[in-house]
Image (cartoon, coloured by chain):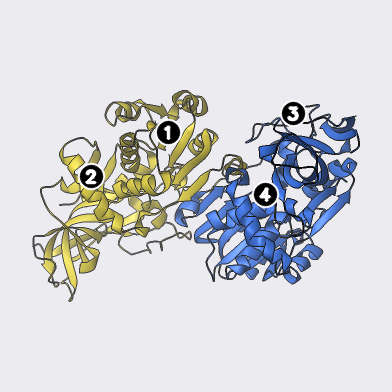
Chain colours: A blue, B yellow
Amino acid sequence: MTNTSRSVTLKTRPTGMPSAANFEIITDEVPAPAPGEVVTRTLYLSIDPYMRGRLSDRKSYAAPVQIGEVMTGETVGEVVASADPAFAVGDITVGARGWASHIVSKAKALTKIEPGHAPLSTYLGVLGMPGVTAYTGMTDIGRVKAGETVLISAASGAVGSVAGQLAKRAGARVVGIAGGPDKCLYVQEQLGFDACVDHRAMNLAADIADTCPNGVDVYFENVGGAVQRAAFAALNVFARVIMCGMVAQYNDAEFSDGPNLGFTVAKRVTIQGMLVSDKPARFAEWRALAAPWIADGSFVYRETIVDGLENAPDALAGILAGDNFGKMIVKVA
Amino acid sequence: MTNTSRSVTLKTRPTGMPSAANFEIITDEVPAPAPGEVVTRTLYLSIDPYMRGRLSDRKSYAAPVQIGEVMTGETVGEVVASADPAFAVGDITVGARGWASHIVSKAKALTKIEPGHAPLSTYLGVLGMPGVTAYTGMTDIGRVKAGETVLISAASGAVGSVAGQLAKRAGARVVGIAGGPDKCLYVQEQLGFDACVDHRAMNLAADIADTCPNGVDVYFENVGGAVQRAAFAALNVFARVIMCGMVAQYNDAEFSDGPNLGFTVAKRVTIQGMLVSDKPARFAEWRALAAPWIADGSFVYRETIVDGLENAPDALAGILAGDNFGKMIVKVA
């Protein structure tokens, strides 16, 4: 066990797109755990769109990261010191939070991972927070029935790719929206969606109409902006909208107006926001359900793994720009 | 039984506010019922905001009234001829539709009213479509719990007044939004709301904040526009929004943008549209529940009754302008 810990702290609040200049890497000694605490050495760090919200002091559901604080984020780590009987050195865990090489956590915040079931990085993606988000949204809000049409924005992303495959398993027609021909090809060929609309082709309304000839019964919203307007316009009577995120505006200082909501009455639409953190019990439920699908290859996922903690800021900028492909993960050790 | 029937037909589609000039009164012979049909003589005609939508050829949940067609609307009527064993001459019914002195209906479209339980006009208001709308919205979408704060727009209106009294019975703090001091006084003093905000005072955000110090858990939307923006901004985490109508824009040729929906994610808000016509079984349920409250005076309602079928167009203009007070009804005979 090395005695040096590296952490990425917030130096300045970004205006617009964040960059490495907004962060600072500090080194320190690896701390010792107090009773009930565990120290993990970070193996993988998850990079997710919601992190942009933590960089702003705009009021949101979670407090922002303060200047000088270590940036937050899910990790998979290996226990290097434990002052709690539930964890032993060498255990692999998920739940420690921070852009850091070593993290002190309360033992109760950690979940032990049994190695060998799935690659460790998947516990941050398809089997982790994004996967559970998709599962909870589709199950609790989408309530997809066979024969319905499901439209999913950011379809090649960590959440969208899981949501779409779940909708296919439910017997729905599944149409993705993604940025660029490569992602669209992946969504159709690898993820098995019935169709994928390229929002960069600037023909959204017509392309959605063409690929969703029976309209849209469930829309999984990850993007916002023009994509949201086009998707809302295609909704059917009794449609459900899972409001998971609106990444298109996360760098905006002021949020622009949304669509007029009169259609929600005429079409009896439900628009429902969700945060997976409200339903912690779904994590274990989802892992038990999906781990066999990962093991037998019937469930597809894609990760972009960037090497080195110092590259975490650029990785965050990448997902906000839509440059990444699939789940963005930083390999820390 | 007179042999002459009078009907109000649509002459021209209104631009903006409808007026009598958009309609035509035609006279005809009272038709005879075919087998399975019933002819009623209209006693009361209901005038409701949704009717503005039927005057436009804009696509909506129901087909528009065609030029030359009799305008649609709920009525209470007396059976004057029956070719169905379920109804006899003299029966009082609700369910026949039309701005007309005499209406031919399928028997199965009619519900018999037992006279003496409540004034007949209430079957178009507090015990009718608006009352059931409020009941269904508050029950199925609002799911109000004791101690929560409920905000209701168009609070003195046919729907809002019922929604608010139901929320009070559920133990909530209930705040209304209405236009002008007279309506606000009525909402507080007669309907028993805890407070009422006058949207004409042009101080909506601050007035909502003052009257809803713990934020808003349920918002019952009847209005749209600036009222909607102010109400949405006050919503709490896990708030529910009942999208019942947006009367402020019913005369608009183009609908303006709505609020940015990012808050629905951060606050896990549910915005759900409803039409009472989806749940016909709730009518009988509501009447059974509320008729005793009307009889014992514990449930308050207010009607504006206009005399004469020829005044129906002006009555519709009145409710769209917010000039009426409570449920608007035309006494036809």
* Lower position in the chain sequence, tag 4 or tag 3: 3
Q: Residue at x 40, y 37 (%)?
A: B152
Instruction: Assign a secondary structure to mark 1.
Output: loop
Label pair 1/4, CB-CB below 8 angstroms? no
Q: CA distance from mark 1 to mark 2?
A: 23 Å
Q: CA distance from mark 2 to mark 3?
A: 62 Å
Q: Is residue B320 left or right of residue A291?
A: left
Q: CA distance from mark 1 to mark 4?
A: 32 Å
| Disc 2: which residue | B290
| Disc 3: which residue | A34
Q: Amino acid at mark 1?
A: Glu
Q: Amino acid at mark 4?
A: Gly
Residue A108 location (% of width, % of height):
66, 38
Name the one closer to the observer, A283 or B186.
A283
Q: CA distance from mark 4 to mark 3?
A: 47 Å
Residue A101 appears in the picture as rendered = yes
Number of other residues with Cα within 10 Å of mark 3, as a class: few under 14, some 14 to 19, many 20 or more: some
Instruction: Assign a secondary structure to mark 2.
Output: helix
Q: In the figure, A118 relative to B270: above or below? A: below
The label number, if any, that marks residue A225 in the structure image: 4
Chain of the residue on which disc 4 is drawn: A
Chain of the residue on which disc 1 is drawn: B
* Lower position in the chain sequence, tag 1 or tag 2: 1
**Mark 1 or mark 2, whichever is nearer to me:** 1
Q: Amino acid at mark 3?
A: Ala
Q: Is residue A137 left or right of residue B330?
A: right
Residue B161 location (% of width, % of height):
32, 38
Looking at the rendered structure, whether the residues under marks 1 and 2 are on a common chain is answered as yes
**Mark 4 or mark 2, whichever is nearer to me:** 2
| Disc 1: which residue | B148
